[in-house]
Amino acid sequence: ELKVEQNPLFLSMQEGKNYTIYCNYSTTSDRLYWYRQDPGKSLESLFVLLSNGAVKQEGRLMASLDTKARLSTLHITAAVHDLSATYFCAVGQGNQFYFGTGTSLTVIP
Amino acid sequence: GAVVSQHPSWVICKSGTSVKIECRSLDFQATTMFWYRQFPKQSLMLMATSNEGSKATYEQGVEKDKFLINHASLTLSTLTVTSAHPEDSSFYICSARGLAYEQYFGPGTRLTVT
């Protein structure tokens, strides 16, 4: 069974700082997704990464994929309070998604 | 864009009763839908894959007789929690498969069993 691990699980960072969330997965896949979840809400799609070396950026968030290392990163630049949420990566295999453990991000003013 | 709705958004029921949750794809047809369960501060766990016109495929450890899934049309899948107990209280999220293996997630249903 495909396993997906994220770290850190919890992240508290000051506004204006940079940080990276890591997503490791155990078996080969060429589809990697990043989602944001606010408390009590469903998932909001952030990025879809479909090939080795893919890099996508939206605002202060940038995601990358290294399929050889089975690693994706979500980099946060100059964090702001509005980015506080839980971030999940998910790996696609066939029809199914396998979700990571989630990273709870709190941005402190 | 593709929109998936769920109904109800929240429900409270008494122990021993059954609850039905609907998942609809509003502007596209979905031959495959997925049901997830999420406990507080935990990740999403896939419960079952629902295919239109055929039986659902359940993940290991999910009781198929307790969580009944019906996917009778290309836009509707239902999850019925039978004889609900407090430990079934959770956030249930459905998703519908789109093109190129994308999944579109519904807003979720919060179930509380008293």
Image: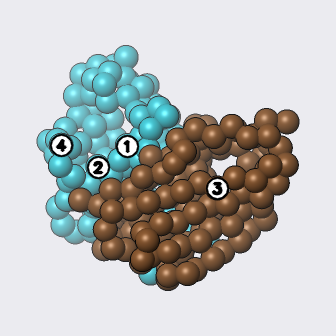
Rounded to the nearest angstrom, the CA distance separating label 2 from label 4 is 9 Å
Q: Amino acid at mark 2?
A: Met
Of residues A108 and B32, the one drawn nearer to the viewer in this rendering: A108
Q: Is residue B6 visible?
A: no
At 76% from the left and 53% from the top, the residue drawn is A18
The residue lying furthest to the front in this view is A69
* Badge 2 vs badge 1, beta-carbon distance below 8 Å: yes
Which chain is indicated by disc 1? Answer: B
In this figure, which residue is indicated by the disc labeled 2? Answer: B47
Mark nearest the camera among 3 and 1 is 3
> What color was chain B assigned in the picture?
cyan
Question: Is residue A107 rendered to the left or right of residue A16?
Answer: left
Q: Amino acid at mark 3?
A: Thr
Rounded to the nearest angstrom, the CA distance separating label 3 from label 4 is 34 Å
Label 4: element kind? loop
In this figure, which residue is indicated by the disc labeled 3? Answer: A20
In this figure, which residue is indicated by the disc labeled 1? Answer: B37
* Badge 2 vs badge 4, beta-carbon distance below 8 Å: no
Same chain, labels 2 and 3: no
x%, y% of residue B4?
51, 60
Mark nearest the camera among 2 and 3 is 3
